[in-house]
Amino acid sequence: MRLESKGKKVRLFGNLTYKVIKEFDRYAKKETFNEIDLSGAELLDTSFIIYLLKTNKKLAVSEKQKQLIDIVKKNLKDRPIKIKKTGFFYDIGFLTISKLKHLYHFLVFLGEVFIKGLDLILKPKRLRFKMIAKDIELMGFNAIPILATISFLIGAVIAYHGAIRLKQFGANIFVVDLVSVSVLRELGPLIVAILLAGRSSSSYTTQIGIMKITEEIDVIKTMGIEPFDVLVFPKIVSMLISVPLLIILADISGVLGGIIVAKLSLGVTLRDFILRLHHAIDIKTFLAGILKAPAFAFLIATIGSFEGFMTQKNVESIGESVTDSVVNSIFAVIIADAIFSILFRWLGI
């Protein structure tokens, strides 16, 4: 949009659409004029016309524009036009409210999961075991190579950086404590959860989102099948089975990476490493990591499924839902991990 001001008259040029209403409204509040000339406009939409009619200014228009304005006047309802407010604090407030609404819908979804889950426990025949097995293969078994590689490298990196400091104090053997405790208590479960949040949660959201767009979910309901039995509970059960096993794998891979680096950088033999490992960790160290598995699994599966159901019936919404799914899953996992750390501290685990 471009404008020219001559006395009490303003001439507008370019595309006059809903996109420039806010810009022109700011100008109108600052300047004083009585007439608006639209004859030089290349494009004029009904939203801008409605706005101009509400200003009660005199309009100078072409014949075609007059016909369009007459149609708008004929069909215009007597209601005030709303101009969206903008500003830093407005954007923060709007974002906060939208996130709170999103959280509210998620809590409602959790309520449905618990209620329908109790009904499923009473009627276990409704559980789709073939779908659970397939999901374990796709989201659990197929994630083993990348998970083992990442965990191995993390354990190796921790041992390598620890070796630099431990050498200075002649405490080479304590690299065992550094690697084993950090991997078993925190890094192993967290690596698994973050990997699955990006890999599995996004997959769940995409699957359900596409089914919603293509109205397959409506077809499932029409067939008398509960969508949660097909799309939600198999994912939750498969994650509850896969995550603990993947955490054990991550622990083993991380410690193995530490063993190799300890041997190469500090001269700690495999025998010495294993002997020290018995003193460095106990059953509480292992349980501190493995007890997080059910919570992480449940959060990843439910958030991924929830974002899929929240997808709007357009293609662009899938990308937004997948992004929200990954970000929210990782955020929820980290918050849960922090809560577990505080809880275990109180319990002495």
Image: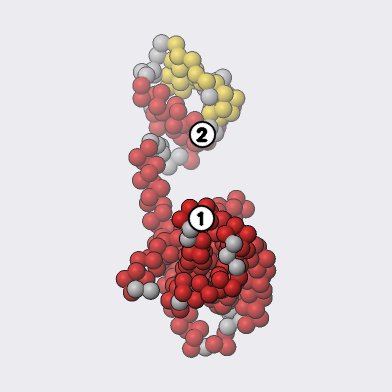
Q: Check disc 1: other Cα within 10 Å, few if <14, some if 14-19, many if 20+.
A: some
Between the residue at mark 1 and the residue at mark 2, the CA separation in whole angstroms equals 65 Å
Place of residue 92 in the rendered image (x, y in percent of width and height, measured from the top left): 38, 44
Q: Say which residue label 2 marks.
A: 19
Residue drawn at x 33%, y 74% is 347
Residue drawn at x 34%, y 69% is 345
Place of residue 318 in the rendered image (x, y in percent of width and height, measured from the top left): 59, 55
Dot 1: element: helix
Q: Is residue 195 above or below residue 1?
A: below
Quarter of the image where one finds residue 80: top left
Q: Is residue 186 left or right of residue 44?
A: left
The amino acid pointed to by label 2 is Lys
- Does residue 197 appear anywhere in the picture? no
Dot 2: element: helix
The color scheme shown is secondary structure
Q: Nearer the viewer, residue 95 or 180?
A: 180
Residue at the extreme top of the image, as rendered: 7
Image quadrant occupied by the C terminus: bottom left
Residue drawn at x 59%, y 57% is 265
Quarter of the image where one finds residue 282: bottom left
Place of residue 73 in the rendered image (x, y in percent of width and height, measured from the top left): 47, 35
Please say if the residues under marks 1 and 2 sit with CB atoms less than 8 Å apart: no
The numbered disc on residue 310 is: none
Q: Is residue 325 above or below residue 73?
A: below
The amino acid pointed to by label 1 is Lys
Q: Say which residue label 1 marks.
A: 167
Nearer the observer: mark 1 or 2; the answer is 1
Q: Nearer the viewer, residue 36 or 1?
A: 1
Quarter of the image where one finds residue 314: bottom right
Residue at the extreme front of the image, as rendered: 170
Residue drawn at x 60%, y 25% is 42
- Does residue 172 appear anywhere in the picture? yes
